[in-house]
Amino acid sequence: MDFSLSKEHEMARQLFKDFAEKEVKPLAQEIDEQHRFPRETVDKLAKYGFLGIPVPKEYGGQGCDIQTYVMCVEEMAKVCGTTSVIISAHTSLCVDPILTYGTEEQKKKYVPDLASGKKLGAFGLTEPGAGTDAQGQQTKAVLDGDEWVLNGSKCFITNGKEADVYIVIAVTGKVEKKGKMLKEISAFIVEKGTPGFTFGTKENKMGICGSSTYELIFTDCRIPKENLLGQQGKGFAIAMHTLDGGRIGIAAQALGLAEGALETTIEYVKERKQFGRSIAQFQNTQFVLADLATKVEAAKLLVYKAAAKKDEYRTNPKISYSVEAAQAKLMAAEVAMEVTTKCVQLHGGYGYIKEYNVERMMRDAKITEIYEGTSEVQRMVISGALLK
Amino acid sequence: MKVVVCIKQGPDTKGGVKFNPDGTLDRGAMLAIMNPDDKAGLEAALRLKDQYGAEVTVLTMGLPKAADVLREAIAMGADKGVLVTDRVLGGADTWATSTTIAGALRNLDYDLIITGRQAIDGDTAQVGPQIAEHLGLPVISYAQEIKVDGDKVTVRRQYDDRYHMVEAKMPCLITALSELNDPRYMTPGGIFDACKAEITTWGRADLKDVEDCNLGLAGSPTKIAKASDKVRKGAGEKVVPESPEEAVSYIVGKMNEKHLI
C-alpha cells in the first residue's frame, strides 16, 4: 500500500493550490456576503480545464483520474466552499451520468461543451416531497409522439439558474414489483431555454451562499424523445449511481473545508496572544489541534480511497464504490463540521466575526452533512451493505 | 517559427532565503520554482505559439531534478524539453553557464531565443546577453512587450523612466521581464502529458563548439567570497528641523557622511 502521491498528482495539487490562492480566495468572502454566483471564477475554471478533469480526451476533457478531480475540489474548498460545489455538481452530477449512461450521440452532443466549461451542468432529483425516497417523486414525463412532456418541479438544485444542461429525474409510468404497483422512474437531459422550463425561487441559504440554488419548474416542457438518458425505467438506479460519485465530490469538499479551517487556525493561534503568550502555547489548543489534524487525516484517507475505488470502477465497471463513497462522505462531512466548529471556538470572539474566514467555513460545512444524501442516508447505505 | 526558451529552476524566496554554513544557498531547504522572469519568457513564447503556431522548446541546465521545471513548462503548453546535466558542468558562474547553454543551442533550430532577464538567486542579468554573444546574435534585453512580423521582432524595452522600441531581424535573443505578462497556469491534462513526455538529456559530450576550460567550476572566473540575505532597512531616524534651511543643511550633511555627494 503506497500512501505517497504520484508526480502527476503532486504537480496537480500544486496547480490547484496556486489557482485557489490567487483566483478563488480573493473572492470568497465577497461572493458569500453578496450571495453572488462567481461567474468570473467559473470562466477561469473553464479556461484551465478544471470543469472536465476526469473526462476522457476524446470528449474534450483533460483525461485525468478521479483522484486528480478530488484534489481539485479539495483545494478549492480550502478557500471557498461555493467554488468547490460548482465544480462537484457540474462534474459528478451532470457530466458523469452522461458519460456513464449516455448514447454515443448524447456524449458527442453534450460532453465536449461541458468538459470545456462552455456549458455548465446541474442535476435535478430532489422535490419538496422526495429526495432519496424515489416513490415520492411527483415530476412526470409523458411520451407524446417524438417528444417527452415534462410537468412538475425540482427544488434545491445546485448551479440552478446558471447551468445550461440538466439531468432531470421524472416518473414515466407504473411498474409492478413484488405484487405492488410502483412508480417507474426515468432520467432525462434537459437544456436551458427549452419552452416550458423556468426557474422558481432562489434559496436563501446558511452557507455556500455564492452557489446558485434554485427551483426548476417544468410546465408542458417538451424535449426530444432521444433525450431520455439510459433506459426507460432505470432512472432511480441512474440517480443513485450518480449520487455515489457525487458523494466523493462532496466528501472532497468537506475535507477541503476542514483542512482550510485547520490551516487558518494554526496560523491564528500562533499569532493571538492571551495572558502574555500565544494561545498555541496552551495545552488545550495543542490537544484540540492534534485531535482535529488526526481526524482530518483519517477523513482524507477515506476520501482518497473512495476516489481510488471509483478509478478502479472506470476500468472494471463490475465493482461498486457505493460503500466507500458513503463512508468517505459520512466521515469527511462530520469531521468538517467538528473541525470548523472547534476552529471558530479557538478563534474566540474573532471566530464569530465575518472578517475571519472560519465562520464562513463553519456555515459551509453544515451542508456537507445534508446534501447528496444526509449523514443518516450514508449510514443506511453502509449498514445496508453490512447486513445484506 | 521555432522558439527556444531558456528556463531555470530557482529557489522560492517567498519563505525566506536559507544558507549553508559555507555561505552557499541551501537549495534543499527551499522549494524549487520556475524562475519568474523565465516564466514570463515562456508565456511570451506560448503566445507566439497560440498566434502563429510556433514550436516552443524549453531548455534548462542543472541537476537531473531540473527536469521538473521542463515538465512544468510542457504542462503549460511547451512542445519539447531539453535538459543539460553533467557533473563537470556543476558550480558554473554566468560565463560557464552561458558557454554551456550556447553549446546546447548550437544543436537546435531556432528563430527566436527567449531568456528571463535574471535569475531570482543570482540577479546578475548576464547569462541571456552572453548567450547571444557566444552565438553571434542580436540581443534585446528587458522586454516588456514582444511583437513578431515576418522575420522581424519588435520589442518594447524597459529603460529607467522611459522605454525603447527596438526592432531586430530574427534569429535573435530577447530577455524577458516578469512584468511582460501574466503567465498561464498548467492544465491538469497538460500535467499528465508532461509527466509522460520524453525529456531530451544532454551531457558535456553533446555540447557543440565549447572548450572544457570554459565549463563548470573550473571554467568560472567568478568566485563567490560570501553570500548573505538582504539586510533589512533600519527603522530610520525622525528629525524635526526648525527651518527649511536647517533641514537642507541636515540632509546635505548626512549625504556627505555617507559619501553620496
Image (cartoon, helix red, strand yellow):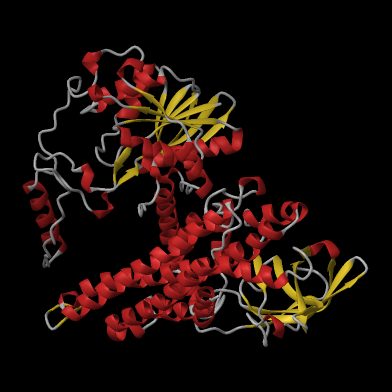
Q: In the picture shown, does residue A292 fall above or below A189?
A: below
Q: Is residue B90 left or right of residue B173?
A: left
* For residue A383, above or below residue B12: below
Residue A271, above or below B31: below
Percent position of residue A87, x then y = 55, 64
- Residue B28: x %, y % from top left: 22, 44
Q: What residue is shown at x 32% (from left), y 21% (from top)?
A: B203
A368 left or right, relative to A218: left
**Left-right relation of B74 to A139:** left
Q: Quadrant of residue A344?
A: bottom left
Quadrant that contains the C terminus of chain B: top left
Query: Which residue occupies the foreground of this view, A327 or A42?
Result: A327
Q: Nearer the viewer, residue A366 or B174?
A: A366
Q: Residue furthest right?
A: A145
Q: Nearer the viewer, residue A350 or A16?
A: A16
Quadrant of residue B42 within the rendered picture: top left
Quadrant of the image containing the N terminus of chain B: top right
Q: Residue at x 41, y 71 (%)?
A: A257
